[in-house]
């Protein structure tokens, strides 16, 4: 018998039972909920007259539709206010911990889980949100679910799931200056395509991945779903333990030592077999940008827009022509934020690049911290001053222009270089044209007012 | 959930590939707290211009095409996990989506709401799309018990895969949650031996 992959080990430990020829009953250790995908699930419980089975294992926050200014005031938009109000009431009624607006722990669900130490190696995590894959950076099996499944987890702490296939993506070698983990994942997505990993759970390995910080690893795992994967994970190591140690919900004292001993077992056996494997050389990775309307449509920043029969519609939407260079193209919006790139490390990188410089007059540059804790930390470190002096607007935490559910939208037809994860049509507002990039590329672009190769200014 | 057995209907062709859930139902319409009413905003930005006038070029605005079967290009439903996408399709009146490839979360969401995702070969989808575009009155018969689909009047019958558990749920109109609630004793037992606290 061959060995087990990291994914197998964690998954198998959580199978309560298996339905013959059907899915498994999978036990869920931690469940995150937010205002958009949970109200119908709570209604379902009410209709059935049942409560939340294990309320202590569900954590709620408000992030998707919240405003990013004046969060101390009532939400102006009636529907958003009602949705957040509903979540507040549901959490009260069902005994679920809620980090709402104004709370010191509020933030984007995939940012607060790790920073509070709720996200840990070897556990299962779900959330009614496809970017739950972010938490896989800690060696957790974490994936997004629909609202019916949110209801399943609330009612029974389990979901019915079929075990996905296993994919290995290995990246080796040192990263060049100015190249970030966002570039790695945009590069991989451009190779594998937006559906190439469907039905799979990815494990990212190799020396390049090993050398990344936890924040950078989260950026990689976050975008697993952009290739269709159920999730992505990275084996826990000293970097993981170092990050978690002392965090609010991380094990303490003796329990910590025991946990670390257990976590050290979480790696793929040498003789384990993957269904699919890819290997890339970091020396081929440079700053990346997207030109189309799905995250797989990425190119190296100095490449021309490719011509392919299946990107005609995308180019039309983006107002681009095949053969055109994006480098040097004027843009009016820069969005730094989202669960992909809104952590303290991202803000530090941006601040270090823009320090002492000024944004271009044509650019509206917005920085949205991923959480209240990130915001506080940025203020403590003086990053807020640096950003302000450079003409960037540092706002309050939430999903913001990543999906345009609040007022932070990009006007129709205008370009936005964005550190988020999706460049779908209308994602940042009806008609908005999104170009995905790393925080450094975004910051450099804000300074020059044109799509810029960050390697030229650092 | 309403049971599904046999569905006979005309089809709506949507040949676009990689249709993501942001197109099916844009985020700004996700503010409702119930499951109903999302059909009005199905494919909102493809269906209406910025002044809310219907775009005549979009298939849902073309009176020739109607029916409860959507025939879509490959990788349908990629992107966000929003179940609102399945609700919107169902609320609009679709019972079946046929494609050569579905995104995982969308497939689960559809199955959990009595919307049947049928995966067939790219070749068959292309020929079906062409046939429907050629003749909007063409009817397709979906037989869930037999796991078969055919164009009415044609001898060519194609089989489709569906997980046996999901099939029986759809046939009976059962939700997964009913099944799980019956497993609570087993789940409690499992918790006692759980290593990851
Ligand atoms: S930041 Fe964007 S991708 Fe992340 S959870 Fe929020 S809406 Fe989803």
Image (tube, coloured by chain):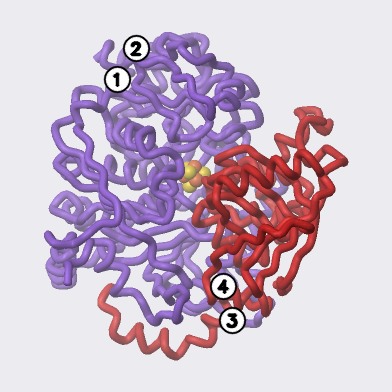
Chain colours: A purple, B red
Residue identified by numbered label 3: B178
Does mark 4 have its CB less than 8 Å from ligand 1? no
Q: Residue at x 18, y 60 (%)?
A: A268
Q: Do labels 4 and 1 share a chain?
A: no
**Residue at which label 2 appears:** A357
The quadrant holding residue B117 is bottom right
The reply to whether the residue tagged 2 has its Cβ within 8 angstroms of ligand 1 is no
Q: Mark 1 points at which residue?
A: A353
- Could you say where residue B127 lies in the image, as x and y percent from the top left? 65, 44
For label 4, the crowd category at 10 Å Cα-Cα, with few meaning under 14, some 14 to 19 and many 20 or more, is many
Q: What element carries label 2?
A: loop
- The quarter of the image holding the N terminus of chain B is bottom right
Residue A72 showing in the rendered view: no
Relative to residue A292, is residue B147 depicted above or below?
A: below
Q: In the rendered structure, the residue with mark 4 lies on which chain?
A: B
Residue B166's tag is 4
Q: Nearer the viewer, mark 1 or mark 2?
A: 1
Which chain is indicated by disc 3?
B
- What whole-number distance in Å separates the C-alpha atoms at marks 2 and 3? 60 Å
Residue under the image location 42 percent in, 38 percent down: A193
Separation of marks 3 and 1 at Cα, in angstroms: 54 Å
What's the chain of the residue with tag 1? A
Residue A156 horizontal side relative to residue A384, left or right: right
Which dot, 4 or 2, sits closer to the camera?
4
Label 2 chain ID: A
The residue at 52%/45% (across/down) is B79
Asked if labels 1 and 3 touch by Cβ distance under 8 angstroms, the answer is no
């Amino acid at each position: 018998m061959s060995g087990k992959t990291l994914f197998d080990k964690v998954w198998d430990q959580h199978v309560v039972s298996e339905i013959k020829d059907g899915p498994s009953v999978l036990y869920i250790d931690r469940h995150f909920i937010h205002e958009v995908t949970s109200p119908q699930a709570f209604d379902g419980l009410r209709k059935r007259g049942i409560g939340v089975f294990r309320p202590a294992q569900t954590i709620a926050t408000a992030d998707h539709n919240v405003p990013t200014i004046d969060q101390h005031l009532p939400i102006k938009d009636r529907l958003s206010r009602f949705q957040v109000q509903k979540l507040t009431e549901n959490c009260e009624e069902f005994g679920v911990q809620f980090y709402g607006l104004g709370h010191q722990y509020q933030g984007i669900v995939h940012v607060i889980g790790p920073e509070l130490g709720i996200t840990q190696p070897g556990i299962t995590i779900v959330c009614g949100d496809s970017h739950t894959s972010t938490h896989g950076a800690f060696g957790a099996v974490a994936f997004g679910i629909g609202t019916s499944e949110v209801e399943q987890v609330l009612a029974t702490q389990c979901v019915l799931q079929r075990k996905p296939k296993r994919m290995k993506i290995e990246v080796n070698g040192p990263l060049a200056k100015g190249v970030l983990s966002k570039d790695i994942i945009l590069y991989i997505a451009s190779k594998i395509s937006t559906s190439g990993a469907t039905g799979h759970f990815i494990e990212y390995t190799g020396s390049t991945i090993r050398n990344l910080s936890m924040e950078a690893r989260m950026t990689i795992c976050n975008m697993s779903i952009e290739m269709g994967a159920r999730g992505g994970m990275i084996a826990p190591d000293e970097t993981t333990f170092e990050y978690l140690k002392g965090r609010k919900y991380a094990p303490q004292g003796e329990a910590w030592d025991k946990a670390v001993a257990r976590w050290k077992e979480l790696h793929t056996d040498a003789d384990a077999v993957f269904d699919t494997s890819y290997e890339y050389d970091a020396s081929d990775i440079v700053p990346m940008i997207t030109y189309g309307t799905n995250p797989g449509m990425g190119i190296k920043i100095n490449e021309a827009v490719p011509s392919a029969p299946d990107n005609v519609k995308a180019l039309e939407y983006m107002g681009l022509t095949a053969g055109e260079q994006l480098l040097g193209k004027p843009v009016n919006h820069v969005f730094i934020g989202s669960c992909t790139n809104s952590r303290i490390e991202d803000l530090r990188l941006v601040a270090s690049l823009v320090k002492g410089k000024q944004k271009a007059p044509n650019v509206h540059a917005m920085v949205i911290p991923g959480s209240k804790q990130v915001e506080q930390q940025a203020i403590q470190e003086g990053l807020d001053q640096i950003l302000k002096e450079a003409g960037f607007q540092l706002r309050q935490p939430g999903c913001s222009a990543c999906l345009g559910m609040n007022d932070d939208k990009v006007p129709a037809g205008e370009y936005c270089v964005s550190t988020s994860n999706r460049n779908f049509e209308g994602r940042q507002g009806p008609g908005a044209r999104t170009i995905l990039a790393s925080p450094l590329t975004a910051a450099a672009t804000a300074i020059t007012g044109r799509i810029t190769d960050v390697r030229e200014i650092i | 959930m309403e049971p599904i057995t046999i569905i006979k209907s005309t089809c709506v062709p949507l040949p676009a590939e990689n249709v993501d859930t942001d197109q099916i139902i844009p985020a700004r319409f996700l503010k409702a707290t119930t499951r109903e009413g999302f059909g009005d905003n199905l494919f909102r930005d493809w269906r209406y211009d910025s002044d809310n006038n219907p775009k005549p070029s979009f298939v849902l605005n073309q009176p020739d095409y109607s029916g409860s079967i959507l025939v879509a290009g490959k990788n349908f439903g990629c992107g966000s996990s929003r179940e609102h996408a399945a609700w919107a399709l169902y609320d609009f009146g679709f019972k079946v989506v046929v494609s050569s490839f579905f995104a995982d979360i969308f497939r689960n969401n559809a199955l959990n709401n009595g919307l049947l995702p049928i995966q067939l070969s790219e070749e068959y989808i292309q020929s079906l799309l062409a046939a429907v575009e050629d003749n909007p009155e063409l009817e397709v018969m979906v037989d869930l018990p037999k796991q078969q689909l055919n164009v009415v009047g044609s001898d060519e019958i194609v089989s489709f895969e569906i997980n046996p558990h999901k099939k029986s749920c759809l046939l009976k109109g059962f939700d997964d949650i009913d099944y799980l609630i019956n497993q609570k004793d087993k789940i409690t037992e499992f918790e006692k031996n759980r290593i990851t606290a």
